[in-house]
Image (tube, grey):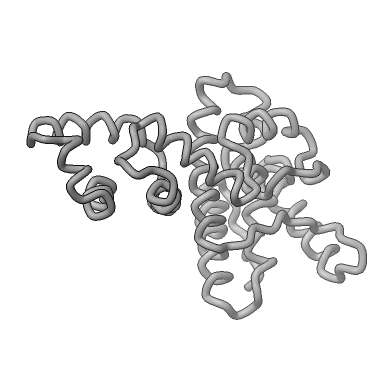
């Protein structure tokens, strides 16, 4: 996809940069290695910014620099900064003021307990994968909201607190490690997106040993 976009954008300039089929093949391999882990929305954003900035096809380093601007454009920390933030806030994460909800959800998916006990060589790749997933959601226009079951004037808070406590006790996990599964409750009741997130929560919690029923 990327080379096809570059070819359409830069026409003869692209052809002169990669004169032979072998050069194109080698270049594609190098680009694939460099861009491993980046998902379609982030790459599409970078392509749009690249054609505004460069008159000639960009180098790999130039394109990676453009990708980094995407994080700033959406108010997101870059992955490494996000990881360090999640590690520093792994205790009582729901009480922290996060730079962006995507950091919280990536940390929750990685597991706060894992971030506290496992080595970086284990948790960093996991966090980066989850963070990329939520970054894509943000770029696609989805608004992420961190669950806050103890909000003042929130009549559902006691029910949500009780549900969190019940799930945590049944599967022997900290409430902060499972709170993100109840994120669907903050979506509008009766919508497809709420139903989709609920189905995911049911599946994930069942895999961890929870046999109770989640509210619709």
For this orientation, the residue located farthest to the left is: 21
| Residue 53: percent from left, percent from top | 44, 45
| Image point (80%, 58%), residue name | 149
For this orientation, the residue located farthest to the bottom is: 190
| Residue 15: percent from left, percent from top | 15, 42
| Residue 157: percent from left, percent from top | 83, 63
Left or right, residue 74 beside residue 34:
right
Left or right, residue 86 beside residue 11:
right
Left or right, residue 178 beside residue 10:
right
| Residue 142: percent from left, percent from top | 57, 62
18 over 159 or under it: above or below: above
211 over 46 or under it: above or below: below
Closer-to-camera residue (89/213): 89
| Image point (54%, 70%), residue name | 193
| Image point (64%, 42%), residue name | 103
Q: Which quadrant of the structure image shows residue 79?
A: top right
């Amino acid at each position: 996809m990327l080379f096809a976009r570059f070819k359409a954008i830069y026409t003869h300039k692209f052809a002169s940069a990669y004169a032979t089929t072998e050069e194109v093949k080698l270049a594609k391999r190098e680009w694939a290695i460099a861009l491993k882990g980046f998902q379609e929305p982030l790459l599409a954003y970078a392509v749009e910014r690249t054609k505004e900035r460069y008159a000639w096809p960009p180098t790999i380093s130039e394109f990676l620099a453009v990708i980094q601007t995407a994080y700033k454009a959406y108010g997101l920390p870059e992955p490494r900064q996000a990881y360090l933030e999640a590690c520093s806030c792994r205790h009582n994460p729901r009480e922290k003021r996060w730079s962006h909800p995507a950091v919280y959800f990536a940390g929750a998916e990685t597991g706060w307990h894992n971030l506290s006990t496992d080595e970086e060589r284990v948790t960093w790749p996991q966090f980066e994968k989850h963070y990329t997933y939520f970054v894509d959601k943000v770029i696609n226009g989805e608004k992420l909201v961190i669950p806050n079951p103890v909000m003042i004037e929130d009549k559902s808070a006691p029910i949500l607190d009780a549900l969190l406590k019940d799930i945590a006790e049944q599967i022997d996990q900290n409430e902060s490690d499972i709170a993100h599964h109840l994120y669907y409750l903050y979506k509008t009741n009766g919508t497809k997106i709420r139903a989709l997130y609920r189905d995911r929560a049911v599946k994930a919690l069942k895999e961890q040993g929870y046999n109770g029923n989640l509210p619709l």
